[in-house]
Image: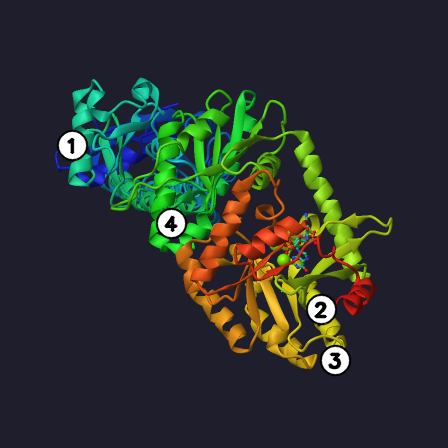
């Protein structure tokens, strides 16, 4: 097949007037059964140029021969066809075949006949897009030339349109292809393919360079053909000066350069731009130039989109505060490593900062942010570069790395040194971790994180500041807790929960001044489940609010029933969990319940633990103040076991410190705990707070506490908690 010259035809329009020898001739097919006609036609048109291109001729002496020729070679501008050859209508049949069977709609057709009587119908001329119909005698040299010129002009236009349409289709396809969100490299490779297809050159001529803010040196992102070996090189390192310079120039000028090869520029966002070079061995045609422009602006849009996708992905997978991947990124990385089967020797750790929310509330948010950033940096520095580090939650970091790198020892070491935060004093941060070895527990990413979380939670409860390795038993324990929770739900809804009561005794005269209400769960099998076990479950599951509300109503009903039987000042103490207290409606609900039961604020005391202080202090103070204004007393339960600082304690409106039983009923020989109790009592005295000691089991304990200034006590020494009936009985004999 003859080399494609379509584009060159178009190009001819644009070049200088003197004929260029590089321009291919217009090819003209002469179909005639009279040998003389061939010679005469060639002679008539000899030496002529149309649109600066010469003519060349191919002869066929019958319709059959012409058809055979045209089947293998469609690259003729014009065919001069005799009407009468093998048959009277051989020429007309040939024309029909060219259009209908060969689907060649660009070749221009001029019909000639020696016998005017065989004139084709007007319809035929119209139907087969015939340029001219002349008798041979009419076709003088000048007429022939005019006719051929008109035919060639219209052929040239048709070809331009065709090239344009093909090019646009190509561009549309390219935009579709390149518009898909892919990585930068794939995108660059896509440009190579599409650009070569557009310019109809073999895919071996192109490279792409990206310029970005992080490294000033552009790099080769995609390369094909003889440039392929330069893939990944910095632009400066490629050996061909011509290509290197062109790309540099284009990136610098932010502009295409089409004079020596094709070098096009794709602007992206401010930080990134692409340049592509095609070593085109010929000048661009005008239509190619225009198509290239359309292509480039299309690609620029796709490129910008790609960068937008990148930014969105960044948002979806990156944590902006600490500059590490987020939970999504962490899951995706575990999944990626699972797919590539490279998880065998890997370990996943979840690292939770101890007391972060407390620190965050006491100091300001900016301090908390700085702390997280410092921890992120420390972890990054502590572990190998291959170890993947993410921030998977508020104060939880995730690590995925080799089991040799992500070890309990290294996790501990990461927090051994204090952290320097801005102008602040170096701060010691402790963290608790859950670790899982993936070789022992292969599972899905979500499952891996869940299991590491199980180990973490367990560590939080029993080994704060340390790392706990996940074991199947832990998962079993977690499952048991889930089962327990569902049993608790059933028990609650079927009223299997009830309250026990334990009296408060004034130490110096033994008077009963009140009682604490303690929740009890007796299973269908008659087994008591201690509140220490089920209350944390209820808190975690959100059930505590409803449960706590029930406790309050039940306790108040009980107290209301005691009116007239006990001293007016007799108070009931209700334990209120942190999650319950932090409900916005807690205070108003409690006050409404008190009123509904015909009681007054001073009949009620709420026992809070120090964990309430993790809340917004301002709001906490407000709530406590409202309660106290209504006469409700506030006791700080389990005092001494939590983390409240003296300054917080001093600023909070509370009435009573409840000394934790671990400082009371410890081994008598061990004086240290009692020492703490004494300190707490001195403190309470200083702050003018009332005191009560829980867990008094012996007369000695009672006496020591009394001597140290403790006002009230509670414990097995007086009596264990009792159900309503037994308590009532006990009360009647002890008043
Ligand atoms: P707490 O508020 O510190 O309650 C005192 C606990 O000490 C009770 O355990 C009580 O039975 C126990 N105790 C009393 N005297 C002695 C003693 O002389 N020696 C010893 N060893 N223990 C003594 P209990 O009833 O198992 O309650 C445990 C915890 O469960 C409570 O600690 C409280 O934090 C929580 N709790 C109980 N009922 C409720 C409730 O209705 N709501 C909330 N939020 N928490 C509750
Ligand atoms: Mg209590
Ligand atoms: Mg207590």
Picture quarter containing residue 19?
top left
Q: Residues within 10 Å of mark 2 (few under 14, many from 20)?
A: many
Q: Earlier in the sequence, mark 3 or mark 4?
A: 4
Q: Distance of mark 2 from mark 3, alpha carbons?
A: 16 Å
> Which residue is labeled 3 in the image?
564
Residue mark closest to the camera, 1 vs 2: 2
Q: Earlier in the sequence, mark 2 or mark 3?
A: 2
> Which residue is labeled 4 in the image?
368
Q: Position of residue 131 (x, y in %)?
A: 37, 45
* Total marks placed: 4
Foreground of the two, 136 or 464: 464
In the image, is 355 to the left or to the right of 488?
left
Q: Residue at position x 62%, y 40% from top?
A: 667
Q: Do the CB atoms of the residues marked 1 and 2 lie less than 8 Å apart? A: no
Q: Residue at position x 75%, y 53% from top?
A: 488
Picture quarter containing residue 609?
bottom right
Q: Secondary structure at mark 2?
A: helix
Q: Secondary structure at mark 1?
A: loop
> Which residue is labeled 1 in the image?
19
Would residue 99 be visible to someone looking at this image?
Answer: no
């Amino acid at each position: 097949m003859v080399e494609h010259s379509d584009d060159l035809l178009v190009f001819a329009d644009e070049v200088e007037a003197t004929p260029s020898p590089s321009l291919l001739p217009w090819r003209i097919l002469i179909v005639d059964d009279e040998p003389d006609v061939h010679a005469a036609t060639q002679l008539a048109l000899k030496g002529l140029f149309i649109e600066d291109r010469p003519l060349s001729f191919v002869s066929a002496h019958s319709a059959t021969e012409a058809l055979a020729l045209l089947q293998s070679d469609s690259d003729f501008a014009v065919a001069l066809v005799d009407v009468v050859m093998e048959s009277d209508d051989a020429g007309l049949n040939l024309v029909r075949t060219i259009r209908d069977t060969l689907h060649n709609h660009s070749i221009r057709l001029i019909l000639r006949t020696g016998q005017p009587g065989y004139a084709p119908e007007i319809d035929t001329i119209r139907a087969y897009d015939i340029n001219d119909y002349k008798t041979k005698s009419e076709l003088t040299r000048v007429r022939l030339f005019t006719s051929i010129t008109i035919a060639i002009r219209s052929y040239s236009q048709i070809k331009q349109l065709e090239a344009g349409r093909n090019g646009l289709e190509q561009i549309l396809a390219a935009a579709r292809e390149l518009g898909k969100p892919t990585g930068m490299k794939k995108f660059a490779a896509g440009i190579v393919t599409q650009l070569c297809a557009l310019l109809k050159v073999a895919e071996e001529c192109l490279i792409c360079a990206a310029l970005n803010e992080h490294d000033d040196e552009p790099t080769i992102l995609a390369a094909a053909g003889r440039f392929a070996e330069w893939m990944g090189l910095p632009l400066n390192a490629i050996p061909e000066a011509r290509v290197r310079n062109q790309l540099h120039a284009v990136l610098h000028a932010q502009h295409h350069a089409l004079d020596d090869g094709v070098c096009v520029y794709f602007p992206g966002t401010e930080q990134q731009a692409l340049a592509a070079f095609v070593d085109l061995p010929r000048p661009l045609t005008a239509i190619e130039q225009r198509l290239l422009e359309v292509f480039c602006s299309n690609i620029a849009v796709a490129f910008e989109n790609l960068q937008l996708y990148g930014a969105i992905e960044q948002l979806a997978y990156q944590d902006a505060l600490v500059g590490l991947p987020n939970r999504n990124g962490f899951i995706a990385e575990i999944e990626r490593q699972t797919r590539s089967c490279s998880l065998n020797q890997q370990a996943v750790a979840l690292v939770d900062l101890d007391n972060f929310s407390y620190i965050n509330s006491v100091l300001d948010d900016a301090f908390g942010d700085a702390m997280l950033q410092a921890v992120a940096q420390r972890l990054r520095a502590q572990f190998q570069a291959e170890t993947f580090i993410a921030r998977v939650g508020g104060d939880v970091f995730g690590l995925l790395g080799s089991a040799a790198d992500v070890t309990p020892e290294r996790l501990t070491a990461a927090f051994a040194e204090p952290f320097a935060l801005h102008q602040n004093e170096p701060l010691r941060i402790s963290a608790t971790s859950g670790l899982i070895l993936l070789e022992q527990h292969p599972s899905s990413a979500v499952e891996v994180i869940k299991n590491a979380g199980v180990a973490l939670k367990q560590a939080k409860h029993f080994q704060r500041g340390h790392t706990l390795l996940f074991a199947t038993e832990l998962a079993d324990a977690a499952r048991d807790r889930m089962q327990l929770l569902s049993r608790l739900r059933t028990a609650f809804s079927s009223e299997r929960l009830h309250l026990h009561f334990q009296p408060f005794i004034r130490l110096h005269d033994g008077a009963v001044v009140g009682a604490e209400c303690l929740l009890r769960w007796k299973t269908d099998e008659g087994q008591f489940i201690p509140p220490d076990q089920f209350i944390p479950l209820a808190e975690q599951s959100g059930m505590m609010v409803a449960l706590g509300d029930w406790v309050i109503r039940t306790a108040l009903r009980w107290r209301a029933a005691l009116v007239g039987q006990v001293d007016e000042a007799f108070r009931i103490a209700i334990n209120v969990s942190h999650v319950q207290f932090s409900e916005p409606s807690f205070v108003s609900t409690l006050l409404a319940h008190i009123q509904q039961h015909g009681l007054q604020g001073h009949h009620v005391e709420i026992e809070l633990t120090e964990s309430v202080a993790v809340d917004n202090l301002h709001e906490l103070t407000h709530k406590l103040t409202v309660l106290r204004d209504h006469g409700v007393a506030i006791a700080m339960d389990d005092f001494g076991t939590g983390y409240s600082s003296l300054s917080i304690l001093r600023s909070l409106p509370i009435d009573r410190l409840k000394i934790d039983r671990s400082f009371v009923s410890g081994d008598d020989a061990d004086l240290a705990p009692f020492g703490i109790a004494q300190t707490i009592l001195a403190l309470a005295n200083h702050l003018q707070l009332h005191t009560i000691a829980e867990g008094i089991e012996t007369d000695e304990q009672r006496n020591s506490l009394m001597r140290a200034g403790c006002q009230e006590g509670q414990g097995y020494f007086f009596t264990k908690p009792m159900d309503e009936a037994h308590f009532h009985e006990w009360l009647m004999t002890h008043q």
